[in-house]
Image (tube, rainbow, N blue to C red):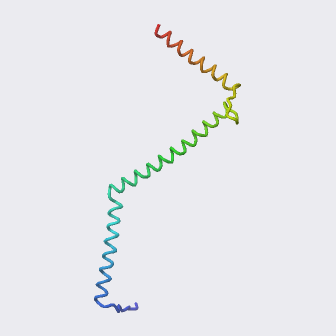
Amino acid sequence: MAETSDTRTPAQIEADIRARREVLAETLDEIGVRVHPKTIVGDARAKVVANVDHTLGRAYVQVNRVVSEVRAQFVDEDGAPRLERVVPVAFVVVGVVGLLALGARRRRG
């Protein structure tokens, strides 16, 4: 094995040791912050919020798409109602409400 000689002075070696201790202390402080329960909880909370925001955003886009598709069934390109589709649906809604009212009336009476 070849020997390597250290040409540093004792003062240089001590300065190197001090510098390495400072770096090590900073690293340990960083690790302490990263593994602190408040940091872990904060990181987890941030991930949950980001996931919820993402999910809500996707849900909003999907609902908006469905509403647009349904609206397109009842309104033409100019924004005028398509009476051939609106009138039958209106009759169905009135009929269902009437049946529900009639059923509620029979239950009470």
Is 18 rendered above or below residue 26?
below
Q: Position of residue 60 (x, y in %)?
A: 54, 42
The residue positioned 31% from the left and 75% from the top of the image is 22
The residue positioned 50% from the left and 10% from the top of the image is 105
Q: Position of residue 102 (x, y in %)?
A: 54, 12
Is 58 rendered above or below residue 8?
above
Q: How many marks do you count on the picture?
A: 0
The residue positioned 56% from the left and 15% from the top of the image is 99
Q: Position of residue 13 (x, y in %)?
A: 31, 86
Q: Is residue 82 left or right of residue 61?
A: right
Q: Position of residue 47 (x, y in %)?
A: 44, 52
Q: Nearer the viewer, residue 6 or 104?
A: 104
Is 25 rendered above or below residue 70?
below
Image quarter of the N terminus:
bottom left
Q: Is residue 5 left or right of residue 65?
A: left
Pick out the residue farthest to the top. Answer: 109
Quadrant for residue 96, please give it.
top right
The residue positioned 29% from the left and 80% from the top of the image is 18
Q: Is residue 101 left or right of residue 75?
A: left
Quadrant for residue 20, please give it.
bottom left
